[in-house]
Image (spheres, rainbow, N blue to C red):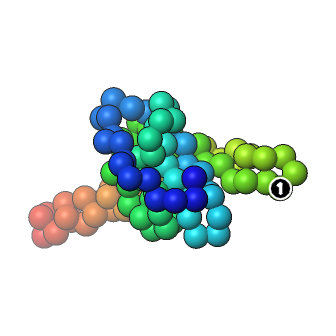
């Protein structure tokens, strides 16, 4: 698909599987599991903005075109892109904030 599609498919809130294809250096396309019409098409930033709107329960499979092997799966990820380590750090920060607030209230 080298041309921008005329219609984009609306995102079904119950959909949990999406496929992100890198068509060339600056063009990406995002499909849902139906693989009919694309959900999003365009630059990395445009498609990323659509991915950010997806449910956190969704899984996105990212493919790139390999000259010898064809479409190759590069990775699978969730829309929030945070790792377990990031979540642990955020919890520690929140706990520290609560401790600081409790100390202030005691004084």
Q: Please, which residue is most extreme toward the right here? A: 68
Question: In this orientation, which residue lies closer to the viewer: 56 or 30?
Answer: 30
Query: How many labels were placed on the picture?
Result: 1
Residue at 69% from the left image edge and 54% from the top image edge: 64
| Residue bearing mark 1 | 67
Residue at 38% from the left image edge and 60% from the top image edge: 49
Q: Secondary structure at mark 1?
A: loop
**Which part of the image, by quadrant, shows the C terminus?**
bottom left
| Residue 85 falls in image quadrant | bottom right
Q: Position of residue 95 (x, y in %)?
A: 33, 56
Residue at 30% from the left image edge and 35% from the top image edge: 13
Above/below status of 44 relative to 7 = below
Above/below status of 18 relative to 88 = above
Above/below status of 60 relative to 99 = above
How packed is label 1: few (under 14 Cα within 10 Å), some, or many (20 or more)? few
Q: Position of residue 104 (x, y in %)?
A: 16, 69
Asked if residue 84 can be seen in this view, the reply is no
Q: Position of residue 14 (x, y in %)?
A: 33, 29
Question: In this orientation, which residue lies closer to the viewer: 42 or 49?
Answer: 42
Residue at 44% from the left image edge and 41% from the top image edge: 37
Q: Position of residue 12 (x, y in %)?
A: 32, 34
Asked if residue 75 can be seen in this view, the reply is yes
Above/below status of 35 relative to 92 = above
């Amino acid at each position: 698909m080298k041309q921008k599609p005329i219609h984009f498919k609306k995102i079904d809130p119950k959909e949990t599987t999406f496929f992100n294809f890198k068509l060339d250096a600056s063009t990406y396309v995002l499909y849902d599991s139906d693989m009919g019409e694309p959900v999003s098409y365009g630059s990395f930033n445009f498609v990323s903005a659509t991915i950010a709107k997806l449910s956190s329960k969704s899984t996105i499979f990212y493919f790139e075109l390999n000259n010898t092997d064809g479409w190759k799966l590069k990775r699978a990820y969730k829309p929030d892109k945070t790792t377990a380590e990031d979540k642990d750090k955020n919890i520690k920060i929140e706990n520290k904030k609560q401790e600081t607030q409790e100390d202030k209230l005691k004084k």
